[in-house]
């Protein structure tokens, strides 16, 4: 498993600042944020202009580009995201499910949309992943299983995020077994409580919350998962570089210890 971090943690700073400090913290790679409102890193409307910079930063700082995150299902937007992924060498594109929790019609629309996007991902040679997300049509393990059953493309996978599963009232360690066959990406962070949001950036740091992330990573390892684990901490756009760096370093140390504890590193 490769340890990465989403550049959204440094959303208030330049992309080079994110690469520089994540490299200093010892990460293997990065997930590039294309999340409007949370960062100005990979601005999709300008991806052709930005892509050479990402390739340079990856080379200069020795960080593999593990994924791109864009929480959208808009066909035109996601087409550009996939084109950008090919250009910068990102094998995975993480999108958002959208829709409404508890609305079966909304879930069916999401499934149909993801199926079409997976076909485009297959065309571009990348993998499209989606995760259960609080408040969205896909929000827990049962709805994730419905998507898995309906979208059979080899270019489609599950992005497993323990914080959303925890806040959906489930045990993330137990939930892994049900979806591990299609897990292609992992977003990771901790949280306290089962409220809608993940809490402050500090509460999202691995080891500071309530989730059994040691058991979670052990379950991934025992299930044969060998893909990226990308830290995703949101809400730090106004944080100083020092604050973002401490979060990145502390979380990476916890992940490294988890991998060592289960014999994965």
Image: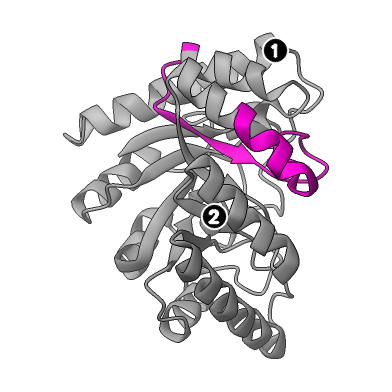
Residue 243, picture quadrant: top right
Which residue is pictured at 71% across the width and 33% down the height? 200
Is 121 a magenta residue?
no
- Judged left or right of residue 167, residue 41 is right
For the record, the magenta segment spans 24-53
- Tag in front: 2 or 1: 2
What residue is pinned by disc 2?
93
Q: Could you tell me how far apart the alpha carbons at marks 2 and 1 are, in whole angstroms?
A: 27 Å
Q: Name the image colouring.
A: one colour
In the depicted view, which residue is nearer to us: 235 or 230?
A: 230
Residue shown at the point (73%, 36%) measured from the top left:
49
Residue on which disc 1 sits: 241
Instruction: Using the rendered image of the protein, determine whether residue 74 is visible from the camera's viewpoint.
Output: no
Q: Quadrant of residue 137?
A: bottom right
Q: Quadrant of the C terminus?
A: top left
Which image quarter is the N terminus in? top left
Q: Is residue 188 above or below residue 134?
A: above
For residue 150, above or below residue 88: below
Q: Position of residue 152 (x, y in %)?
A: 40, 81
Question: In the rendered structure, does residue 38 fall within the stretch colored magenta?
Answer: yes
Q: Secondary structure at mark 2?
A: strand
């Amino acid at each position: 498993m490769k340890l990465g971090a989403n550049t959204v943690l440094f959303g208030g700073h330049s992309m080079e600042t994110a690469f520089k400090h994540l490299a200093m913290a010892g990460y293997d790679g990065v997930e590039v944020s294309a999340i409007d409102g949370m960062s100005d890193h990979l601005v999709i409307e300008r991806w052709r202009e930005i892509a050479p910079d990402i390739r340079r930063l990856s080379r200069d700082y020795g960080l593999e580009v593990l994924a791109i995150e864009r929480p959208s299902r808009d066909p035109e937007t996601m087409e550009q995201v996939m084109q950008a992924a090919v250009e910068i060498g990102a094998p995975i594109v993480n999108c958002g499910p959208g829709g409404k929790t508890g609305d079966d019609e909304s879930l069916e629309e999401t499934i149909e949309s993801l199926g079409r996007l997976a076909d485009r991902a297959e065309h571009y040679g990348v993998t499209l992943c989606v995760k259960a997300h609080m408040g969205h049509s896909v929000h827990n393990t049962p709805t994730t299983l419905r998507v898995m059953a309906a979208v059979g493309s080899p270019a489609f996978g599950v992005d497993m995020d323990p914080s959303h599963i925890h806040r959906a009232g489930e045990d993330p360690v137990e939930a892994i077994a049900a979806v591990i066959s299609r897990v292609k990406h992992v977003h990771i962070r901790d949280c306290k409580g089962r409220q809608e949001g993940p809490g402050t950036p500090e509460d999202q740091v691995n080891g500071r919350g309530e989730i059994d992330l040691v058991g979670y990573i052990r379950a991934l390892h025992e299930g044969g998962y060998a893909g990226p684990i990308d830290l995703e901490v949101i809400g730090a756009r106004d944080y100083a570089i020092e604050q973002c760096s401490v979060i990145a370093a502390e979380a990476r140390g916890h992940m490294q210890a988890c991998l060592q504890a289960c014999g994965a590193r």
